[in-house]
Amino acid sequence: MFSDVYIIIPCYNEHAVLRETIEKLLPLNAQIVLVDDGSAVPVRNFTAGMPVKLLRHPINLGQGAALQTGMDYAVRMGARAVIHFDADGQHQADDIPRFLETLDQGADVVLGSRFLRAGDGTAVSPLKRLVLQGARLVNLLFTGLWLSDAHNGFRALNQRALKKIHLHENRMAHASEILAQIRNAHLKVQEIPTLITYSEYSLGKGQKLSNSFNILLDLLLHKLL
Amino acid sequence: MNLIQIILIGGFLLASILCHVALKNRLIARLFFLGQFALGVILTFCPELSQWAADVLGVGRGTDLILYLLVLYVYVGSILILGKFRQLEHSLTDLTRQIALANPESPSVSTRSDHPAE
């Protein structure tokens, strides 16, 4: 059904729920690309027999770098569209067809949002919600885009966007960098509602709130140097 | 010659030699550090020159002027080093990416590499 759609999953020591995450994606018949970002134990040890493509960074670079490697691979393979998907199981595979439909309706980039549909954002803690509001402001200042959510890693990009976007921020600051590039390249962006499931595992693996300052500093550094 | 002058000249000389060894084929950088070495030696033997420069610039003492310039120097140096790190990070990222893209694997088929069409 989606054989020319590439789902890119960056992995860094994500072994606990990886197979489960992949199994939920299999019914889509899309191309699943795992980018092993230098995991201590290679991801290949946990994906035996699974219909996926594996790309392994010999060293750990960060999620932004892993996504770009996956996008480069997808472009080489002639992908119609690319989906950014988290390995920790917090994104819903069932949402992917809606992302692709929105691309088909004319968007170049589709971004998931936890705050467009009543109930989706209830799983977000009040403190995190506050930080996300700050992150929305930072995104506005650095990228000029005013979005309902910040740092939601669930995205879809069409071929036009793949040609225009190249992530240079290796770590988490790529989430703001991609918005700046969307704006600079005049790509048509659309947000759609997504439910993020915060399991104990994904919360443990997820970004610490204190990391927001690192992201901000990365962005400043990128602007200055 | 005072003991402190011997220590300072020895330190300047050692740092200068290390810089020249590390900066092979980089003439401008070598000249820059040579200039620093010369300045250090001159100020070690003629500390009154720093007082003269301080008076010209409106700073109270020569040692204060040297301290201010040192702070500025450390900031500028740090920024240049950060920029260099960033360049190296980009190079390392490109290299790592090329290695990953050259060796895609398909676990379901076999352990052989499966190269994309160029």
Image (tube, coloured by chain):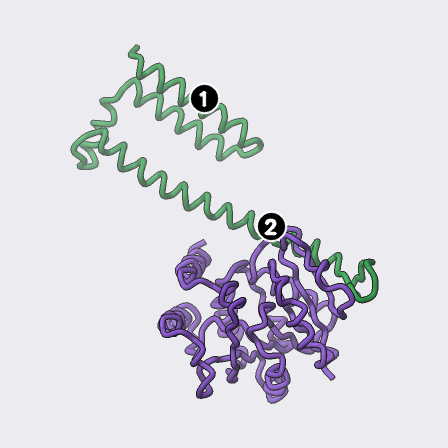
Count the labels in the image: 2
* Pointer 2 chain: B
Q: Amino acid at mark 2?
A: Ser
**Where does the C terminus of chain B fall, quadrant-wise?**
bottom right
Mark number displayed over residue A117: none
Residue A160, given in percent of the width and then of the height, sits at 62, 76
Quarter of the rendering containing residue A29? bottom right
**Where does the N terminus of chain B fall, quadrant-wise?**
top left
Chain B representation colour = green
Chain A representation colour = purple
Q: Is residue A58 placed above or below A14 in the rendered structure? A: above
Residue A108, given in percent of the width and then of the height, sits at 58, 80
Q: Residue furthest top?
A: B1
Residue drawn where x is 59% and y is 77% of the image: A156
Residue A7, given in percent of the width and then of the height, sits at 66, 73
- The residue that label 1 is drawn on is B14
* Pointer 1 chain: B
Looking at the picture, tell me which residue is in the foreground, B85 or B106.
Answer: B106
Mark number displayed over residue B91: 2
**Marks 1 and 2 close (CB-CB < 8 Å):** no
Residue drawn where x is 43% and y is 58% of the image: A214
Quarter of the rendering containing residue B2? top left
Q: Is residue B38 placed above or below A80 in the rendered structure? A: above
Where disc 1 sits, the SS reads helix
Q: Residues within 10 Å of mark 1 (few under 14, many from 20)?
A: few
Q: Residues within 10 Å of mark 2 (few under 14, many from 20)?
A: few
Q: Amino acid at mark 1?
A: Leu
Q: Is residue A34 placed above or below B15 in the rendered structure? A: below
Residue B43 appears in the figure:
yes
Establish whether labels 1 and 2 are both on one chain: yes
Residue drawn where x is 48% and y is 34% of the image: B29
Where disc 2 sits, the SS reads helix
